[in-house]
Image (cartoon, rainbow, N blue to C red):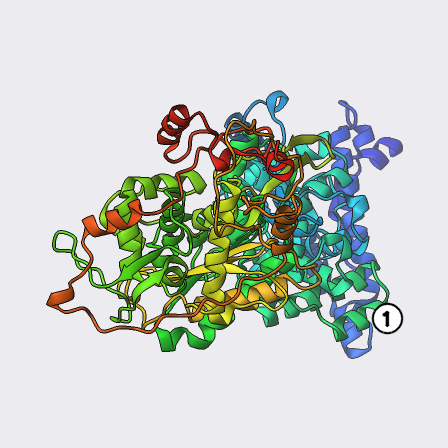
Amino acid sequence: MSAMRGLFGRKEPVFDAPRPRATDLRADPADRVSGPRKRKSRQRDDEDVEDERPSRRRKRGFLSRLFGGSDRNLGKKSDKNSQSSGRGVKKSRRKRRSVLGTLVYTSLVLGIWGGIALAGLIAYHAAQLPPIDQLAVPKRPPNIAIVSEDGVLLANRGDTGGPAMHLRDLPPYLPKAFIAIEDRRFYSHWGIDIPGIARAVFRNVTGRGGMQGGSTLTQQLAKNLFLTQERTISRKIQEAILSVWLEQKYSKDQILELYLNRVYFGSGAYGVEAAAQKYFGHSARQVTLPEAAMLAGLMVAPTRLAPNRNPSGASDRAAKVITAMAQEGHITEAMAKIALARPAQAVRESGSGSINYAADFVTDILDDTIGAIDQDIVVTTTLSSALQSSAERALSDEIDKYGTRYGVSQGAVVAIDPNGQIRALVGGRNYADSQFNRAVAAKRQPGSAFKPFVYLSALENGLTPDSVRDDAPINIKGWKPANASREYYGPVSLTQALALSLNTVAVRLAQEVGPKAVVSTAQRLGIVSDLQPNASIALGTSEVTPLELVTAYAPFANGGIRVQPHVITRVKTASGKLIYQRKGTNFGRVVEPKYIAMMNAMMQQTLLTGTARKAELRGWQAAGKTGTSQEYRDAWFVGYTSNLVAGVWLGNDDNSPTKKVSGGNLPVDIWSRFMREAQKNVVPQPLPSGTWRDLVPPPTGIPMANAPPNSIPVASAAPDSNPLSGPLNAIGSLFQPPAPVPQPQPQQPRGPGNGPMTINQAGEAASRSQSRPPSIRRDSGNSLIPPADIGNDRRNARNSDRTGSIPDQDRGFLSRLFGG
């Protein structure tokens, strides 16, 4: 019983004892019938731990730390606060855990869906591109390198403006300059530089360092090769896709090489070689460190920073490139200091850039020469860089000095050798101002420069340089041509009339032989433009180009051979494979040697006593003819030696009159200056000439012998007691300039009692001539054998049939030399 009372006995409260904990009144979980509840036990254990933690913290609470004492005397209120604080910490921790988990979960979900959306977007834009297995780098547009006869590069033509370069051919600091400023991690990324993009975005948002782009060199190459320049999200995505493809297909060096040969450098230059030639005047192989930095700096804005337009901006950008190269370790600090102290300077094109006229002409005829171009080629021309520069300076300096005074704004110069090779071609005053090539495309009236074809027609119809015609007023169905001076000299020789450029005599001669004969003669010598066979053709009223007029004068310099003007001699690929080689061909002889001798003797007087007296060249036999069109709209001079034929034209593009510019002033000055420089260090050679006075018909029935190859063409000579004296005298006369012809004094115009010569009177005078018309044979194989059927050969053939004799002009050199 005592035990039962002890177990179930009543306990009396004790007021002095410590207050029991609430847990002491509960049954022990082990004494319960159902056994302990593990979940609640764990919960209770947690609560006990939580209760113990505040108790431990209560050893030195907030107030004790604040007032330096113990917090035991705070009593029951402090215990309650501690318990409440423990439960608050638990709830706050649970809340924080729930917020963090929500953020992680939300971010994970959004990331997954964002990745899916990005993959779909990439797939969509990738579908807009050609299939990857069919994708290929577009072939680079071919470059045309135009070089002079001695291999000097004159110009580049094509869409790129320069040939492709290999990395091994470039100085090592040139590609490193592009890497330093455009893509520092080029050799480490896989086409897209994520850190670079992030850095660019951060700087663009914060405004630090200005606006920057995150495109790699590979991305820039992809844009240049496959895409447009539009700035859209679609283009950027496609750019990234293509960049990854390029990185998988090509090596880093191959990508860098493609980049340097394809990007735009401003001023029409694509590729580093074209840019180096454009801005510095030499190949990319020879660029210096400051020049390399300036080229790399152009990538950010090639048009705005072009050094030939914005030198200060280009220099500032180049300084940043040099600094970046030093920071990346591509150059030393000492090299950077030297490069910053000596910035690159862009070269300015000297003169008017006239070589571009010749380069355009080469490009225009290249398609007809070799057809379509699908690779880089090198075109070797007949042009001389020295003569081209001389012609350019002579023309531009004269117009700059006298253009305003004489009302002249444009001009052209063409020079060819007696074989038709174009040695210099200047198509205008300044190529930058006007690209129209007046040397080959401008058709203008030649004026009196056309008269040699009139006089040659007269000679071939029986006249000689000593034949006399009347310089007097003439009336042709109401048309009354007059001399430029309005003076008349009366009876004059043809030599005097041509030297003084007398219009009335030229018109009379054209009427005697017929305008159609004059047109035929001009076209036979090389004029290809349409010519009107009317009375005014004698004064050069039909338009021609400077190139064809100069070409038509070439037979006078080479002895009567018509030539084909040409500028291309050879075409090779960049690897050296021969594509085209010009063969030496011509049209054969078109004028007999004796008429060439007569014309040269007459046109030499133009320089000695006539309208081109200022054009005389010391030590050289030179001949030529001035020309001035109506109202001084065109001024010409075409002159030649045995080494070179050159022509000068001056005028205005709108065909407005000049202030009395004639062929005898500014054109002669330009021609003389150019020819003096062109003939330096050249041994003088005489013009084709011979004896032509006192011609006597040879004996009949003697067979004709052809002239030996490479012999000097000599006209028929008068008989002499020594059978060799005639030919020797003829050969000796080749080296003697003609004596100046006395010039007639002007006469007053004839009055009514002694009126102008009529056409009938002119015809009667012509019929009294003792010379007979020529019979000319054509043979393209031998330039010294006269070609056939030119002039009035039918009439000559009839005369030969009637008399059974051989005309004097058909007798060869050997028959005249040995008499059999």
Quadrant in which residue 488 is drawn: bottom left
Image coords of residue 648 (percent x, y): 46, 60
Amino acid type, callout 1: Ala
Vertical relation: 518 (above or below) 807:
below
Q: Nearer the viewer, residue 641 or 264?
A: 641
Q: Which of 746 and 650 is in front in this view?
A: 746
Q: Report whether residue 118 is seen.
A: yes
Q: Report whether residue 306 is seen.
A: no
Image coords of residue 83 (percent x, y): 71, 55
Image coords of residue 800 (percent x, y): 41, 27
Q: Which of 53 and 161 is in front in this view?
A: 161
Q: In which quarter of the image is the N terminus?
A: top right
The residue at the far right in this view is 3
Horizontally, is 223 left or right of 656 in the view? right
Vertical relation: 47 (above or below) 752:
above
Tag count: 1
Quadrant in which residue 734 is drawn: bottom right
Q: Quadrant of the C terminus?
A: top right
Q: Residues within 10 Å of mark 1 (few under 14, many from 20)?
A: few
Horizontally, is 253 left or right of 362 in the view? right
Label 1, secondary structure: give it.
helix
Q: Nearer the viewer, residue 646 or 497?
A: 497
Q: Which residue is at 22% across, 60% downward? A: 481
Image coords of residue 689 (percent x, y): 56, 51
Which residue is the site of mark 1? 334
